[in-house]
């Protein structure tokens, strides 16, 4: 079933109005007709099954058949990701959405090879997350806030029950070792292509972050972020099962 985003202002108790590019795609590309059913979501957890009543190039009116509300439930995973070049960051945003990451914090670390992202770039990443929701069935996109420096990020570490920083020089501890079943929030921090500087890792340690190695594998930064998010979601039980079950 087709799934589209609808601005909350265009949802009433009885109908949904689909406008702009979403309407053009449904009417001109997919050639849907009156009577077709589509699922709409407002990005705030409300999901509605609707039936098209009238359809035109720029405006679709659909009757709401049923509705449900999905609320975020812990444990929550936050990914602090050093800003990467080109489309690599786009892919991280897309896959983090699919994996159920609650928030991605763009990180300005010392070895970042790109300038600090502008507000327009952050809005672009938020749109990518919203588009990914259509494909994966997630009722609300992840949060993408303003970029932070490592020092600014450390001011937020107290928000999380567990905190890990990926570091290629860590040889003793792997990712997510010994996470208690009571964990309700986790932060993982992934560096840029050039890795973290030693003083950044020291700062993270001082703020309660545990360095985590990657075993014998050498991973690209975007791969480390996606793989790390998947492993953590598995351990937290957010993939439907986890090591806790065994």
Image (cartoon, helix red, strand yellow):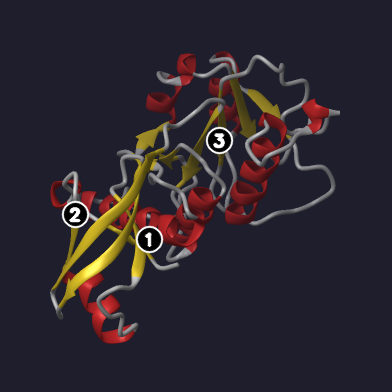
Q: Mark 1 against mark 3, which lies toward the viewer?
A: 1
Mark linked to residue 189: 3
Badge 2: how crowded within 10 Å, few (<14), some, or many (20+)?
some
Mark linked to residue 104: none
Left or right side of 89 for 181: right
Where residue 66 sits: x, y (%)? 34, 49
Badge 1: how crowded within 10 Å, few (<14), some, or many (20+)?
some
Residue 211 in view in this figure = yes
Residue at point 42%, 37% (across, down): 70
Q: Mark 1 against mark 2, which lies toward the viewer?
A: 2
The residue singled out by tag 1 in the image is 131
**Front-most of residues 23 and 86:** 23
Choose top left, top right, bottom left or bottom right for residue 46.
top left
Q: CA distance from mark 2 to mark 3?
A: 42 Å
Given contact means CB atoms under 8 Å apart, are the residues at marks 1 and 3 in contact?
A: no
Residue at point 41%, 43% (across, down): 142
Q: Is residue 5 above or below residue 68?
A: below
Of label 1 and label 2, which has the lower sequence position?
2
Residue 47 in view in this figure = no
Where residue 108 sits: x, y (%)? 40, 41
Left or right side of 69 for 8: left
Q: CA distance from mark 1 to mark 2?
A: 22 Å
Q: CA distance from mark 1 to mark 3?
A: 24 Å
The residue singled out by tag 2 in the image is 15
**Front-most of residues 186 and 199:** 186
**Front-most of residues 16 and 9:** 16
**Front-most of residues 100 and 46:** 46
């Amino acid at each position: 079933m087709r799934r589209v985003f609808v601005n909350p202002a265009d949802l009433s108790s009885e109908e949904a109005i689909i406008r702009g590019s979403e309407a053009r795609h449904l009417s001109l590309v997919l050639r849907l007709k009156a009577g077709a059913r589509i699922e709409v979501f407002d990005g705030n957890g409300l999901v509605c099954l609707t039936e098209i009543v009238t359809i035109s190039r720029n405006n679709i009116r659909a009757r709401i058949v049923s509705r449900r509300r999905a609320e975020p439930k812990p444990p929550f995973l936050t990914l602090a990701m050093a800003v990467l070049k080109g489309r690599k960051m786009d892919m991280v945003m897309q896959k983090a959405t699919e994996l159920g990451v609650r928030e991605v914090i763009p990180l300005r670390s010392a070895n970042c090879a790109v300038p600090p992202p502008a507000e327009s770039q952050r809005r672009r990443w938020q749109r990518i997350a919203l588009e990914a929701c259509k494909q994966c069935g997630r009722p609300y996109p992840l949060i993408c806030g303003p970029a932070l420096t490592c020092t600014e990020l450390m001011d937020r570490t107290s928000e999380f029950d567990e905190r890990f920083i990926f570091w290629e020089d860590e040889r003793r501890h792997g990712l997510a070792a010994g996470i208690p079943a009571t964990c309700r929030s986790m932060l993982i921090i992934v560096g840029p292509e050039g890795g973290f500087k030693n003083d950044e890792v020291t700062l993270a340690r001082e703020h309660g972050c545990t360095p985590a190695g990657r075993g014998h594998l050498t991973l690209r930064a975007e791969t480390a972020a996606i793989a790390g998010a998947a492993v953590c979601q598995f351990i937290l039980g957010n993939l439907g099962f986890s090591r806790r079950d065994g």
